[in-house]
C-alpha cells in the first residue's frame, strides 16, 4: 500500500514532536496494557459496559481530565475534557469498549479504548499549555446496531467538536477504508398455534413464514448488487416441537455502499416479508432495531498524517483497496457531521477474521499491544497537530466541506457564514435526526 499525500496538505510537524509523543507513549504503555487487559477480561455487551467505564474514566481523571459519565443520557457513555490555556479547536478521541455475544472482544474494542485513551493523555503531556480542548468521548454500543455515537450526536455531545479520531484493530493496516451503510431490522411473524401432530391444519406456522422469508432473501442475492449484503438469524422459532409456532422472528442486517442504496434494498426486503406472510397465512411486521449506520467518509488529510506517523514507526500502511470487503459502524453517521478518521492497524496475523475467537485471543497478545502503542502515537500526532496548527485543521475542514457540497449541502453553516458544519442530514437514519454543530467552547 502507498501512503503518499497530495497537493496542499500541510507539512507534518517536526521529528522532535514525534519523539516527544513516542516517549510519552512509552511511559504510558504499562498502564495502557493494564487497562486493555482489564477490559478484555470482562467483556460487556452494548450499553452494559460499566466495568470498562470505571476503568477508563478512572485513568482519565488521574491524568487531569474533567470527566462526566452518563453523557447524552447514555449510562455507559462519558466525556473527558482537558481544557487548554487559550481558545482553540476542540478535538475528540473516540473510545469504543463494548463486546460481542459469545466471542467477547472479538472486535478488539479493548485495544480501541485503551489506545485512544493513551493517545489523548500523551497529547496533553506532549503539548503542555495546549490551545483549545482535547477530549476523550466514550461511545458505547457500537456493536449489534446499538448506534451509541448516533445517540450521543442527537443529544448534542458532539456539538462544536472540530474533528474526531480513532483507530480499529485488524489483520491488516489501512489509513482509509470504505464502510458499508447498514440497516438493522427485525421481521416478526404472527400465526396461529395448534397441536403439530393432531390438528396441524388448524394452525398457521410463523416459523414456516420465517423460513420462507429467509429463502426469499437467498433468492434475491443473485439479483442485488455485488456490493450489497443480506444476513440474519432466526431469533425466535417457537418453544416446543409439538406446537405449531404462533410467533417467529428474524433479526437481520441489510447493507450496501450508500444509505440510499441500503434503504432501497430494505423496501425489497419488506416486500419479501409480506410475501412470506401471504403464502403462509400469517402476518408480518418489519421494524428497525437500531438507527441506520451511514457509509463512512474518511478524511484523507487527517488519515495521511496518521499514516506518515505510524509508517515512521515501522507499520506498512496506506489507503485500503476500494473493493476490500467491509463492515459497518456508527462512526459513519458521525463522519457526516465532522472530519473523522478510522484507520485500521494490524494487530493480528493476516487472515484472522474479525468477530471471531481468533481475533479475541489476538487482541490480548503482546504484538497487539505493541501495535496499539504505535496506533496511539499516530492518533496523538493528529490530535496535537489539529489543536496547534490552524492550517492543518483548515485543510481537513476544507476537504470535509467539499465532500458535504458534493453530497448536496453547501458547507456554509446554513446561514452562508462558512463557519459551521451546516445542516446535517439524517444522522440517525430519520429525517428528524438532523442537527447543527455548535461551539463546544465559549
Image (spheres, grey):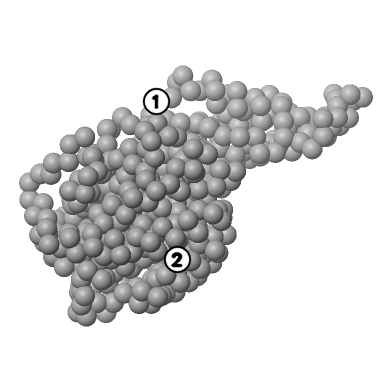
10 Å crowding of disc 1: few (<14), some (14-19), many (20+): few
Q: Residue furthest right?
A: 198
Task: Give the SS element for disc 2.
Answer: helix
The residue singled out by tag 1 in the image is 225
Q: Which mark is residue 56?
A: 2
Q: CA distance from mark 2 to mark 1?
A: 42 Å
Give the quarter of the figure containing the N terminus: top left
Q: Position of residue 285 (x, y in %)?
A: 63, 40
10 Å crowding of disc 2: few (<14), some (14-19), many (20+): many
* Residue shown at the point (54%, 20%) measured from the top left: 219
The answer to whether residue 332 is left or right of residue 413 is: right
Task: Give the SS element for disc 1.
Answer: loop
* Residue shown at the point (62%, 28%) measured from the top left: 213
Q: Position of residue 416 (x, y in %)?
A: 18, 63
Q: Position of residue 237 (x, y in %)?
A: 72, 35
Q: Marks 2 and 1: which is nearer the front?
A: 2
Q: Depth check: 265 or 383 in front?
A: 383
* Residue shown at the point (50%, 48%) measured from the top left: 105
Q: Which mark is residue 287?
A: none
Residue 161 in view of the camera: no
Q: Quadrant of residue 433?
A: bottom left
Amino acid at each position: 500500500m502507498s501512503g503518499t499525500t497530495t497537493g496542499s496538505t500541510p507539512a507534518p510537524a517536526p521529528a522532535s514532536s514525534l519523539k516527544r509523543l513516542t516517549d510519552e507513549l512509552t511511559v504510558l504503555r504499562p498502564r495502557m496494557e493494564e487497562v486493555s487487559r482489564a477490559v478484555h477480561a470482562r467483556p460487556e455487551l452494548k450499553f452494559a459496559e460499566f466495568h470498562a467505564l470505571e476503568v477508563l474514566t478512572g485513568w482519565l481523571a488521574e491524568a487531569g481530565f474533567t470527566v462526566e459519565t452518563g453523557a447524552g443520557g447514555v449510562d455507559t457513555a462519558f466525556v473527558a475534557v482537558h481544557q487548554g490555556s487559550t481558545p482553540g479547536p476542540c478535538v475528540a478521541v473516540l473510545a469504543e469498549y463494548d463486546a460481542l455475544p459469545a466471542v467477547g472482544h472479538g472486535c478488539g474494542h479493548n485495544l480501541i479504548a485503551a489506545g485512544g485513551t493513551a493517545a489523548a493523555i500523551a497529547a496533553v503531556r506532549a503539548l503542555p499549555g495546549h490551545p483549545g480542548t482535547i477530549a476523550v468521548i466514550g461511545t458505547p454500543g457500537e456493536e449489534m446496531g446499538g448506534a451509541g455515537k448516533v445517540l450521543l450526536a442527537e443529544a448534542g455531545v458532539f456539538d462544536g467538536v472540530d474533528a474526531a479520531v480513532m483507530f480499529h484493530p485488524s489483520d491488516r493496516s489501512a489509513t482509509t477504508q470504505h464502510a458499508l451503510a447498514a440497516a438493522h431490522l427485525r421481521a416478526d411473524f404472527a400465526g396461529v398455534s395448534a397441536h403439530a401432530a393432531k390438528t396441524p391444519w388448524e394452525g398457521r406456522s410463523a416459523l414456516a413464514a420465517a423460513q420462507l422469508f429467509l429463502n426469499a432473501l437467498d433468492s434475491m442475492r443473485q439479483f442485488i448488487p455485488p456490493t450489497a449484503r443480506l444476513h440474519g438469524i432466526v431469533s425466535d422459532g417457537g418453544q416446543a416441537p409439538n406446537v405449531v409456532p404462533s410467533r417467529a422472528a428474524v433479526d437481520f442486517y441489510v447493507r450496501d455502499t450508500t444509505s440510499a442504496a441500503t434503504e432501497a434494498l430494505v423496501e425489497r426486503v419488506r416486500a419479501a416479508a409480506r410475501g412470506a406472510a401471504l403464502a403462509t397465512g400469517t402476518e408480518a411486521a418489519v421494524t428497525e432495531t437500531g438507527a441506520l449506520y451511514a457509509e463512512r467518509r474518511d478524511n484523507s488529510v487527517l488519515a495521511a498524517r496518521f499514516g506518515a506517523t505510524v509508517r515512521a514507526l515501522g507499520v506498512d500502511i496506506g489507503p485500503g483497496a476500494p473493493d476490500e470487503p467491509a463492515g459497518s459502524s456508527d462512526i459513519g453517521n458521525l463522519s457526516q457531521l465532522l472530519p473523522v478518521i478510522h484507520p485500521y492497524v494490524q494487530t493480528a496475523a493476516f487472515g484472522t477474521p474479525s468477530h471471531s475467537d481468533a481475533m479475541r485471543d489476538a487482541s490480548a497478545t503482546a504484538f497487539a499491544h505493541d501495535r496499539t502503542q504505535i496506533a496511539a502515537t499516530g492518533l496523538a500526532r493528529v490530535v496535537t497537530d489539529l489543536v496547534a496548527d490552524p492550517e492543518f485543521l483548515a485543510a481537513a475542514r476544507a476537504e470535509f466541506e467539499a465532500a458535504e457540497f458534493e453530497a448536496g449541502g453547501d458547507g456554509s453553516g446554513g446561514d452562508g457564514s462558512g463557519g459551521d458544519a451546516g445542516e446535517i442530514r439524517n444522522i440517525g437514519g430519520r429525517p428528524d435526526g438532523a442537527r447543527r454543530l455548535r461551539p463546544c467552547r465559549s
